[in-house]
Image (cartoon, grey):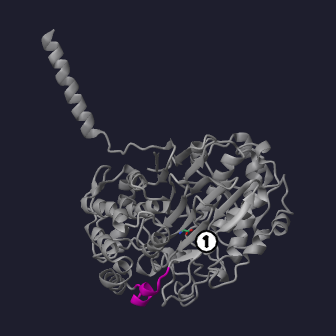
Amino acid sequence: MKLNLRFLYIFFILTVISCKSTAPFAYPLQKSAVADQGMIVTAHPLASDIGLEILKKGGNAVDAAIAVQYALAVVLPVAGNIGGGGFMVVRMADGTTNTLDFREKAPGKASRDMYLDDQKEVIPRLSIDGHLAAGVPGTVAGMAAAFDRYSQLKDFKTLIDPAIKLAQDGFAITQQQADGLNRSREAFIKLNTNTPAFVKKTAWKAGDLLIQTELAETLTRIRNQGTAGFYEGKTADLIVAEMKAGGGIISYQDLKDYEAIWRQPLESTYKEYTIISMPPPSSGGLALSQLLKMVAPYPLREYGFQSAEAIHVMAEAERRVYADRAMYLGDADFVTVPIRSLMNDAYLTNRMADFDPDKANDSRMIGAGLVTPVESEETTHFCVVDPAGNAVSLTTTLNGGYGSKTVVSGAGFLLNNEMDDFSAKPGVPNMFGLIGNEANAIEPGKRMLSSMTPTIVTKNNETYMVLGTPGGSTIITSVFQTILNVIEFDKPLSEAVSLGRFHHQWKPDAIQLDELIKLSPDVEKNLIQKGHHLKQRGNFGRVEAILKQADGRWEGAADVRGDDDARGF
Ligand code: GLY
């Protein structure tokens, strides 16, 4: 008997050991959380943790957002960045609002036809891969501007040190990250002058440490010298040398001239809610407010969640809004964007005048364009609410997954491929299938049009919901659906962010369905009978959201589509 017990014990230990060595590494993710004081939702648990610690140290939502942005530049190389840009929407507890534009800019040597051949045709992938795809990065200037205006801690080192440590010591990558790095291995080799930290001899696997020594050095220069640690001195030397080595055009002057800009938020109403979002150069805020205004007259609640009637009217609104986007939207510092006209109630009522409840419209009758397959849609969003009630909604991006896939040699960070968000040639779609026009043509110093839609929704003059998502052209429609999932369809927040989604962007003329959507055969049949084309595709969006509950506590929810994580205290 004694022997048997001993045998069983040894067997148990061996089983535990063997399970331990074969079980794939995974962070324990918190997909939703409820808390009294502060809440953070980001695309990586280590970044959520860092943000939370800053709040606990007495930092406000902006302090936490800065720390998260730098942490994501290390732990989420696919989209987190210092070589890209983004937008921040802020609502302080006193009700004041602001937005920060740290979008990339076209370099001074950029020109309208820089991606066209002698026949004026678009040269495939020139605006997507490598050095020439990169716009002048805005993130470091953006974080400095946010710090100067809003920091409560007033101690930048505390905000950036955790990111430096993660880059120096390394962090364990997740399965999703291992898959992403392995998929991009060949591109990293092809598009870099030196082998970056993202390439190793054997395939990456979950739990492997990603150490980014050169990135740690760059972050240290930023810590010690502020924006000069990036836009001047050694980092600038390394960026310009990289440009020379790879045929890029970002110059010392471009880096020196870069400025983040505070802009008046774009505010609109939907029923008793106020929507605070990003103005141009993002199309996100404008498109979101157009969409909500266009569907407001229809009884969505009565139609029901993802009923044929609800999908039909929402998709028809989307068709019209994306056609407007293609025609009118661009950097308002360079072109006149008729924002007021596009948001005007009479205009939007008229825009839906030819909506037929029984029949889909035809995008050819609304505008013209061509189609290209949708590629990667990597960007990342995070939300923060602090104990005082200040809120930040921030979307940041390199554009495609790992941006241009070019790392600045010696500086260890990836450059964006945001130049693809310009319209390389009017009417020719970019990698998201989005069509642009004159308004979004390339000009030196201009910001490329974005779809990023960091948003804060208020109710009774209090912050009610903070949300946003990555997803290229699908960002706007994912935010639109998430708001309606909560407000009209009474979905709990965790479902609202994770349920399957649909998307119409005028061209291609189809309702795109993500993998998680579950339409009944009757709904599909009904939509097809109305004349819609349904197109199944991969998942889109990784929505992060915070919602004020009826009892005044904050609920955070992270999309199930990634390693996203919500935590509060
Ligand atoms: N790069 C994606 C966007 O800004 O819309």
Q: How many marks?
A: 1
Nearer to us in this view, 332 or 372? 332
Residue 132 spot, x, y in % from top left: 44, 81
The magenta segment is: 248-259
Q: Residue furthest left?
A: 3
Q: Does residue 470 sit above or below 23 in this rendering?
A: below
Q: Does residue 74 sit above or below 495 in this rendering?
A: below
Nearer to us in this view, 458 or 540? 458
Q: Is mark 1 within 8 Å of ligand 1?
A: yes
Q: Does residue 263 sit above or below 535 in this rendering?
A: below
Give the position of the C terminus as an image quadrant.
top left
Local secondary structure at mark 1: loop
Question: Label 1 neighbourhood size at 10 Å, few (<14), some (14-19), many (20+)?
Answer: many
Report which residue position mark 1 lands on. 282
Left or right: 511, with 230 as reference point: right
Q: Does residue 372 sit above or below 232 in this rendering?
A: above
Q: Residue furthest top?
A: 1
Q: Amino acid at mark 1?
A: Ser
Task: Report which quarter residue 480 is drawn in.
Answer: bottom right
Give the position of the N terminus as an image quadrant.
top left
Left or right: 388, with 234 as reference point: right
Left or right: 376, with 191 as reference point: right
Residue 565 spot, x, y in % from top left: 45, 48
Q: Visible in this render: residue 249?
A: no
Q: Visible in this render: residue 309?
A: yes
Is residue 532 inside the magenta stretch?
no
Nearer to us in this view, 495 or 428? 495
Residue 375 spot, x, y in % from top left: 52, 64
- Ligand 1 placement by image quarter: bottom right
Residue 180 spot, x, y in % from top left: 40, 58
Instruction: Name which residue lies at 37% across and 63% down.
Output: 159
